[in-house]
Image: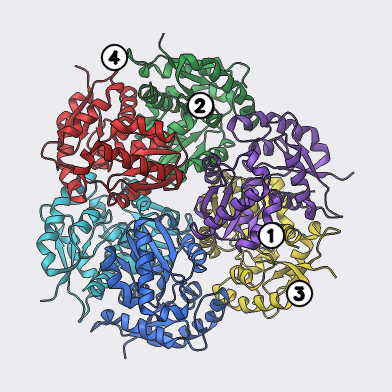
Chain colours: A green, B red, C cyan, D purple, E yellow, F blue
Amino acid sequence: MPRSICVINPNSSVDVTRGIDAALEPLRLAGGPPITSHTLHDAPAGIQTEADIVQVLPRLTAFIQANEANACAFVIACFSDPGLAVAREATSLPVLGIGESAMLTALTQGQRVGVIAIQPTSIARHWRTWGAMGITSRLAGERALGLDVAELQDTQRTWDRLLEIGGQLRDEDQANVLILGCAGMPQFQHSLSQILGVPVVEPSRAATGMALTAACLTS
Amino acid sequence: MPRSICVINPNSSVDVTRGIDAALEPLRLAGGPPITSHTLHDAPAGIQTEADIVQVLPRLTAFIQANEANACAFVIACFSDPGLAVAREATSLPVLGIGESAMLTALTQGQRVGVIAIQPTSIARHWRTWGAMGITSRLAGERALGLDVAELQDTQRTWDRLLEIGGQLRDEDQANVLILGCAGMPQFQHSLSQILGVPVVEPSRAATGMALTAACLTS
Amino acid sequence: MPRSICVINPNSSVDVTRGIDAALEPLRLAGGPPITSHTLHDAPAGIQTEADIVQVLPRLTAFIQANEANACAFVIACFSDPGLAVAREATSLPVLGIGESAMLTALTQGQRVGVIAIQPTSIARHWRTWGAMGITSRLAGERALGLDVAELQDTQRTWDRLLEIGGQLRDEDQANVLILGCAGMPQFQHSLSQILGVPVVEPSRAATGMALTAACLTS
Amino acid sequence: MPRSICVINPNSSVDVTRGIDAALEPLRLAGGPPITSHTLHDAPAGIQTEADIVQVLPRLTAFIQANEANACAFVIACFSDPGLAVAREATSLPVLGIGESAMLTALTQGQRVGVIAIQPTSIARHWRTWGAMGITSRLAGERALGLDVAELQDTQRTWDRLLEIGGQLRDEDQANVLILGCAGMPQFQHSLSQILGVPVVEPSRAATGMALTAACLTS
Amino acid sequence: MPRSICVINPNSSVDVTRGIDAALEPLRLAGGPPITSHTLHDAPAGIQTEADIVQVLPRLTAFIQANEANACAFVIACFSDPGLAVAREATSLPVLGIGESAMLTALTQGQRVGVIAIQPTSIARHWRTWGAMGITSRLAGERALGLDVAELQDTQRTWDRLLEIGGQLRDEDQANVLILGCAGMPQFQHSLSQILGVPVVEPSRAATGMALTAACLTS
Amino acid sequence: MPRSICVINPNSSVDVTRGIDAALEPLRLAGGPPITSHTLHDAPAGIQTEADIVQVLPRLTAFIQANEANACAFVIACFSDPGLAVAREATSLPVLGIGESAMLTALTQGQRVGVIAIQPTSIARHWRTWGAMGITSRLAGERALGLDVAELQDTQRTWDRLLEIGGQLRDEDQANVLILGCAGMPQFQHSLSQILGVPVVEPSRAATGMALTAACLTS
């Protein structure tokens, strides 16, 4: 049985895992590695705080160790990239974070990157990550939808906010490429890009693509 | 007939094209796009000067236009990424440059990037590119082999210099990931990494991998 | 016959050349080098795309080679500085780009630089250049007039937009020096500066001044 | 009983805790908060890997919650600042990390900061932190003693290496302020500074001082 | 008689000195150094221009030399940090500037720093300082109250503007920590922080706290 | 009588003034402004400390006010640019500093700038200035001759050190343009450039050239 790219949703929402899994379909190639999606059991329902991340870390490394024999790469499918450093230390297989990969992919699609966050409270944390990546000068800005979990269920409302915030990033902040700052919105990627007229990067796809390359090149 | 990822060697050296072509074998997957390699006819024998780049540009865009109907992505396989901006404007298909892609890939494999150039004269040009990319703070340093075309034919001598320069980047500049700053040295990637104990990024592979992802996700 | 500073308008608009030529009058000194203006024949009517730039490059280097014997310096009079690197390689004479020179001059006249572009599509390209220059932290922002060629013929409308956009850069972005991001607006420099109360840099003048210095010091 | 500044040594070495405790004596003021030192039970013997950090995190937040009622501030006394973000979220009391505080203090004592690490493997991690802090342009460099735990017991050898590495940072990297990149070397601070003729920052003292200020100002 | 931390108000306004002096009460600890406040005689009434700073410099160094025997540290209590470099050269005692210290303290309390200036004309000067500090990537923005000396007497009006400008920095610029960019507003610190829900750094307190640490550690 | 560009040597060494004056000969053009050199009376013999700078400032502004009626621009001819900010405030005429102008000129002649200082103690101060300029990412490095005033009288020894240090900046730091970090060495510019094969910027010439442009364009 071929080793697979294990995409780990580090929160316990099976719905989110299912959405990610569907979004990765175009990266499943006959001769390529299988791509499997996994919900991290006992993980928080969502990852919004640093405490959520602390809870995730041992579960994540345990998952990686338990699955290393059957894996060719791992993807951590949360935009905050929880545990990216420890996971890379825990295995010699490639590990990609969707936040990091989305940003790197965006850098190939535009000069000024705009990021759409769910909640304003994440923005400072994201900037810390981008500082560590050394790419803050490429940021046009980040703006938040400001929608809570219940509101995100309302597809129309989410869509309207995406258009509004994406438009502000494009027109007021002069972004010429956008990133969806969350693993839970792949279904909006293509229409948002089409209507706003700028590329939109979906982070789970970006990271799984980088994992696919890494898996092919290291195996 | 499926559309292919067209990897363009923008110099006229068929040997270099052949080396690149072989290096990409692991990325040729059943069910995935074919990966074809192309020598840019009438291009300079090597790309070392800005004048060489000027010569390349119209040939490159002509090639892209002539092959767009059969392509799903393009890779410009010269570390100076000649014509990356104009190529991206000339087609709506993904275009990846091996210099840019190698750097972005290296950013996922280490915090401090060391680059091995062929000639010292390229170093300033590379720094200009990295400035435009906004990632100069991630550079541990760049050092040159200082070998001319004839000397590069001498595999032993090239290997000795790679070890020496790679070791300096690791030990004196504290790089923890290295990039081969040229399309012509894929055969050294794995042994160099093994002996020096740090990841080594081969740029044509890095870029073609990113093109593979992009091709899958946009088709 | 003394060697002259050749100011090259790399588009084919003779009107623009004429405007530049008039703007440089204060830099024509009895004992200094003549300053001559040139329209690049067969060049695009305007330089707005990367393809326009590709078209310009061979014409530009041909011009430089043809005129090197009679020149003491060259100025490339398009804000995107097309061909600056290749031109510097093609001749040992000083070559100045008006985009680069305008920015360097602005750095001596204020701490936070605001740039007035013609079209929003140029903004990303300008940021790439400023990244390569390593000076992005000095940018207060860039905003575009959003006027097309026809609208730019309407002096009153252009003036109104300049005032509006310049005022936004000063008041909302806290720029304390402005740059006219185009070779075609020298006639507005002094009145804009006077009304907005901040220095305004005109790029062709800035670059030709730097060329004058370079010509005197290298001859 | 007045609330105390709790200085947490996040590894389980009681010797290290004792050394830190002694070093903080000058910050114990009659009218100021007590300063107490604590060894994190069940923590790793030393913190050298990302996995060590993961182990520390829940113990650290548990300690903070258990001691919040009697504390006026917390100090995390490991140069890698493990858990700084989660600790700051876990309590409304001030939390200082010795890595961050040492760097901020150094910024007031010199323009170019040199850091003395114990092991070369930490250097990349430190640079990631400095990137997140946004201060990489102030780094003259980091160099490692390259001594293991046993060798660090040899005071003479450690001192010789400190002098050698500190001298390189001053003379080759042009640092004009140094940081001891570890909580375990306070006894060398003053003599190193005196002999090398540049200020030397001891991180536990720097952080506890910042905690003292914060405690006074928020109580 | 114990040596004291001398806090120097470099303008001649005794009222401002009095306000600073009261604000520092929490840092006066039994067993710690006395904290004394001083008005610089013959200094300008306020420090708004570079010429004001020139006037301050010799008076400041004279004060330092005259008081060195009785001091254990000096604080320059003007947000522009006039004379910080020369003061540090003039004495081997610690010298802290309130602008620098406020920024360093803010870096421990949030990722994106917003600064509230009194007058828009100071903004460019502040950015120059932050450039020299190498921390511009941490700035969310600076906005000015735009109140003159007379208007600042009107407490209600000042408070209203503080709320308005602080709210803009938080909501439009996404600052998650604020700095009062002036020594004259300590009385607003705590209520502003409480109402806006983000930490607010008062610069004289921040610097005197850093001086307290430095004094304890060097004596 | 035409207004002149006043080049101010802010130390009291008439010999240095004379050397600067001779170096500016190529910028004295018929029809252009006269260029006059001035020794600042009662100034320190050399400017090496911050205290020297404090002494210079009131003398400098007094000079500017006394000469404004006959001047069209001012140049401050000390590489530390003492008083640049206050001078620019004191007059509406252009004021150029030789340190700033040399760096801006170097940015047009190479991508990686190497600076040759006289004394190592100046290096930290220069980096502070370059931070304020926002151009630190363009620095390849700065190295000092380490010669005192007496040793600088020995032309052969100075020349030998210039070659040695310049060669290190070129070969070890990969600078492709050099700056003479002092007003006192114009006589070495051309031979140093010729032998090392990289452009060498002489700061008084660079600044006076920028002043010439500014004078022509504002009169």
Crowd tier of the residue under label 4, counting other residues whose Cα lies within 10 Å: few below 14, some 14–19, many 20 or above:
few
The CA span between labels 3 and 2 is 68 Å
Residue linked to disc 3: E69
- Mark 3 falls on what kind of element? helix
Res B30 label: 4
Residue linked to disc 1: E207
Nearer to us of marks 2 and 4 is 4
Res B103 label: none
Q: What type is the residue that disc 2 sits on?
A: Arg
Residue at coordinates 70% horizontally, 36% vertically from top-left? D10
Please, is residue D42 above or below residue E64 in the view?
above
Question: Would residue F206 appear left or right of D88 to someone viewing this image?
Answer: left
Residue E157 vs residue A58, the one in the foreground: A58
Q: Pinpoint residue A119: horizontal percent, then vertical percent.
A: 56, 33
The CA span between labels 4 and 1 is 65 Å
Please give the chain letter of the residue carrying mark 4. B
Please give the chain letter of the residue carrying mark 1. E
Q: How many marks?
A: 4
Question: Would residue A185 appear left or right of E14 to someone viewing this image?
Answer: left
Residue linked to disc 2: A157
Please give the chain letter of the residue carrying mark 2. A
Q: What type is the residue that disc 4 sits on?
A: Ala
- The residue lying furthest to the right in this view is D1
The CA span between labels 2 and 1 is 48 Å
